[in-house]
Every structure is written in structure tokens, then in C-alpha cells.
Image (spheres, grey):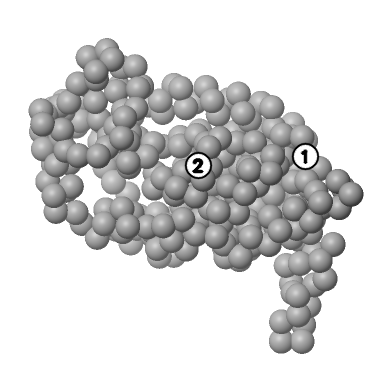
Amino acid sequence: MTQPIESGGLPDQHQQSIERAAALLAESRYCIALTGAGISAESGIPTFRGKDGLWTKHGEPPLNQYEEFSADPAAWWGRVAERRRNPDQLTATIAEAQPNDAHFAMAELERIGVLKHIITQNVDGLHRAAGAECLTEIHGCTTLLRCIECNSRTPFDEIPEVFPPRCDQCGGIVKTDTVMFGEPIPPDCLQRCYVESSQADCVILVGTTAVVSPAADFAFAVGQRGHPMIEVNLDPTIITQYCAVAIHDRAGELMSRITAEVKQIKTAAAN
């Protein structure tokens, strides 16, 4: 086990919790993760909720977004095309963002076989960019298009020539993959989340307030079966009281240190 890191002559306040979290991860048979906007905040993408969140400052988007899309997909695509040609600050920020240490640490936990699946509420694609492969983007991804009939996905590389675009496989209407307010979560995503969470004996929640259903429900289901929940978040949340370990600080450093500790445990066990 690593020695506590000294900071200003005082023991690192997180070291014991980091060691406990790492032990739970290393001991687990099938650990999954739930991540939210907080994990990408260190990549420069603003969160939605909280003190400086976009929705806190500006209010939540209208709840009838999908209804508006369904009423006139061609007009909706015209607005999307205009935003692609002249992106606002948030669109440009997401497009330019790069994975941070927390994304890379979680991809490493997957690579060494400890983290079996990530359910992310984020649409920024940064987990995939960091190398994660066992991934469900439950709210979609800005870099993909999705058919609303068959759920097939293709890269969103350029603006379609015809509005609305049609699916090459089934002829259904295609929209961006991001899930709008009022739009059902794609059934293939829901099914994958059910399958993964039903197998889990440990869940780590990173950068999420866990207030959005159904994403949060999958994490809570693991805890309700008596398995450990680990929280890594900047601030305490409604789930803190239910967690075996809760660490509140920047996710990048914490996840890097937890991952390093897990690797030490695994190495020691193998020798």
C-alpha cells in the first residue's frame, strides 16, 4: 500500500478513502461506473447543475424539444445545420474538449479488467476518446447520428445534403444521437444498462449528482442489492450517505490515484 502523501506537513486527507475505494474495486467481480457532467468539467465543459451550472444560470431547456423535432424534422435540421456552421460557445467548447486524467484513469481500469462497463450521462464522447470501449452513452453523443426507427448510428462528420436525412438501413428519419427532452431513451441503451447493472457487485459514481433517471436508477439498483457504492465528486450529493466510500475533490487526481492504487493491489496479489 502506498504511504500517505504529505501536504504542508499534514497527512493527505484523502489517502485512507482512496485506499478503501481501490480495495473495493480490486475485490469486485463485476464493477460498473456511472459518470456525469462533473467528470468533464476538468476538460472545460460546463456542468448543467450546481453553483455555476448552465441550467442554474440560464434555466433548463424547454421540455418539448422532441415534440418540436417530430412536428417538423426538416426545419429542426435546418437549425442544426446553422449551429454547425456558426457554433455557439458551448458547441465549440464540446467539440474542442479533450479527455482529462479521470477519463484516462477509467479507461485504464477497463484495460486491466477491473471496470467492466461505464454508463455515462455525458454526450461529449470523451470516454471513447480516452480509450473506453465497454461504454453506454445513455443520453447519446454529439459526434453521432441515430435513426429513430432502428437505432443504427453513424458518425456525424458533415451536414446531410437532404433534410431530414434518412437511414440507409431502414429508411427511418435520422436525428443527432443526443437525447432531447421529451424523447425516450433509446431502447438498446436501456437494455444494455439493465444487463450491466444486474451483474454488478460494485458501482463507482464519478462526477454525477445522481438525480437524473433512469441513469441514476442503475447505480442505485446495485446499492440496493447490498453491494458497495463509491462516490467521487467535487461536492457531497444525495447519494453520499449511501456510499461505502465518498471522496469529494477533483475527479482527475482522485481517479488517477485510485487507479494507481488498484494496480498496486493487483500486482501484489499476482506475486
Residue found at x 74% / y 31%: 225
The secondary element bearing badge 1 is classed as loop
Q: Residue 28, image x and y in percent?
A: 77, 39
Residue type at the position of mark 1? Ser
- Outermost bottom residue: 9
Q: Residue 115, image x and y in percent?
A: 66, 41
Query: According to the image, label 1 marks what residue?
Result: 28
* Left/right of residue 62 with respect to residue 19 in the rendered view: left
- Residue 237 seen anywhere in this rendered image of the structure: no
Q: Residues within 10 Å of mark 1 (few under 14, many from 20)?
A: some
State whether residue 132 is above or below residue 4: above
Q: Residue 35, image x and y in percent?
A: 54, 47
**Res 193 → quadrant:** top right
* Left/right of residue 59 with respect to residue 133 in the rendered view: left
State whether residue 137 is above or below residue 266: above
Residue type at the position of mark 2? Thr
The secondary element bearing badge 2 is classed as strand
Please report whichever mark, 2 or 1, sits nearer to the chain's N-terminal start. Answer: 1
Q: Which mark is residue 158?
A: none
- Outermost top residue: 170
* Left/right of residue 167 with respect to residue 233 in the rendered view: left
Query: According to the image, label 2 marks what residue?
Result: 120
Q: Residue 254, image x and y in percent?
A: 64, 62
Q: In which quadrant will I find the N terminus?
A: bottom right
